[in-house]
Amino acid sequence: MGKGLSFDKKAIIIKDLHLSIGNKEIIKGMSIEFPLKAITAIIGPSGSGKTLLLKSINRLVDLIPNLKSFGEIFVILDGEVKEVHSLDPSYLRRKVGYVFQNPNPFPHLSILENVIIGAKLNSLVKKKDLVKWAKEKLEEAGLWEEVKDRLKEPAWKLSGGQQQRLCIARMLALKPEIILLDEPTTGLDIYNTKRIEELMVQLKENYTVIAVTHSVDQAARIADYIAFLYDGRLIEFDVTSRILKSPSKELTEKFITGRVLDGVRR
Amino acid sequence: MRRVKALFYSSLSLLCLLLLFIPLIWILVEATVRGGYYILERPLEFFTDIGRPPGIPGGGIGHALQGSLYLLAMALLIGAPLGTLTGIYTAERRNSIIAKISRFVSDVIVEFPTIIVGIVAYLTLASRITGIFNTGPAALIASFSLGLIMVPITARSVEATLISISNEIREGAYSLGLKDRQVLFRILIPIAKSGIVTALLIGLAKIAGESAPIIVSNGISNFWFSNWTEPAASIPVLIYVYGLSPFNEWQTLAWAASLILLLLVLGLGFLARMVTKEVWVRV
């Protein structure tokens, strides 16, 4: 599988992805290669297909009714090239972690239980090691010091920024190799935004990180690469500095300088 | 002008609220005045004894309380799993044909005259000519009818509770690699737990006061519960029979039983509200 593809320093290769919901085509033929152990930011106006592209990689799009998609998505997991549609979605989603736009901890579970539930139900960690595992992941997500004395409290008692870091810990507890983040700092204050941005930069040492962001500034601060999407197509993909300083497409330049309104012209 | 308008409409809605309360309070007062005193006079006899023959003072509704308890417990046993599972199915496979049909049927049956459910249950299960069990009028058939009556109302409330869980929670669960079964039983149902309990309480409150389906499927009994294949006594039927009788003693018992039934249904309603409140705090 994936014959003829060069995976040199790549983690994900998407070939000619199309995706439509009902009769509306949202992703109109997209091919992208995401570099290994780097942060790639996906930018573009709303409606350009950023989130659906992200959710295609771990097949969360399968949950959307009336959705049709075709094209191939190859990922390297456990050292092998795999096409996502041939994988068990449960395995795929464990290996390709996802953090949502709004923090979504499980309201009926405590802070501790939220972190370990995925690892526990997927039997990834021995039962007696779960608490230790949770501590490790909360530390990795930079939340341990704030919650170490309140692990039994319900997760909804945490602040928005803490909840988001809890969701990151919950995702890390699954031992993923690729991490997808969908505008993870939306609605957070500057302090929490900064914490999560620092965290993302730390994460790229061990994981391939792809982050959708609404802010070009954020992309400039954290990303090694930027993919600019517009109206369901990839317009430009390059290292961050080149996209920001000398984009090769006029549309890219217009977007990063704020001259394309947020919203696709239809 | 705006303040006058606001005052006018808020007074109007307050008035409507009062109008709504009048019958409720009226019935409560009436039942208390006409029957409540009897409970206070002979509490032990009222709750533990059976009705006396006409003309002989005293007696109680113990047999009806016991019968209602049996009937409702069995109805819950039949209706709760059916209603809950239907609700879960229509919520989680909400776009499937089966879910759409089930939703439509639920909405129709909810408005169905409950006596029809009783008659259908009697004819298909109990009737000596066409029925499956050939029991004749029997407590089991009444429970079955009551169970069926609570299914649609329970199913719709369970469905509403599950649907109210945000999609991001559902997606979050799937994003952890959980399987359908785990998402349902480890995440969604525990979150919706209080809502499901509320749904069952609402269903129970609906059937607690039903008399028609019991009369047509179980008949009338004035004795202690003996067997599932025999008629059982129940509070609503006792109220119906004693209330229509010309005997003062029976009418007093009917009023007192009405008071108990009202308090029971109100209690279930309050309980449901309390459990619901907890849901809103948590989600």
Image (tube, rainbow, N blue to C red):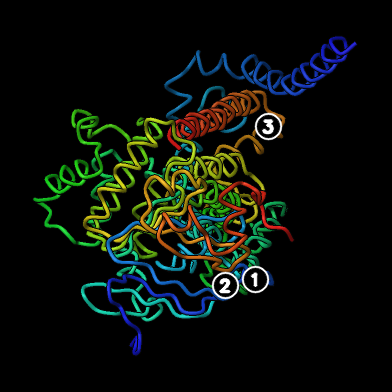
Residue B230 shows in this picture: no
Q: Amino acid at mark 3?
A: Gly
Report the Cα–Cα distance between label 2 and label 3: 68 Å
Q: Nearer the viewer, mark 2 or mark 3?
A: 2
Q: Amino acid at mark 2?
A: Leu
Point 24% across, 58% down: residue? A174
Label 1: element kind: strand
Do the residues indicated by labels 2 and 3 lie within the same chain of the protein?
no
Please tell me which residue lies in front, A234 or A76: A234
Q: Identify residue for label 2.
A: A19
Q: Amino acid at mark 1?
A: Glu
Q: Which mark is residue B257?
A: none
User: Is A168 placed above or below B240 here?
Assistant: below
Report the Cα–Cα distance between label 1 and label 2: 6 Å
Label 2 marks a residue whose chain is A
Q: Identify residue for label 3.
A: B243
Decide: few, some or many residues near mark 2? Use Cα within 10 Å; few <14, some 14-19, many ≥20.
many
Q: Earlier in the sequence, mark 1 or mark 2?
A: 2
Do the residues indicated by labels 1 and 2 lie within the same chain of the protein?
yes
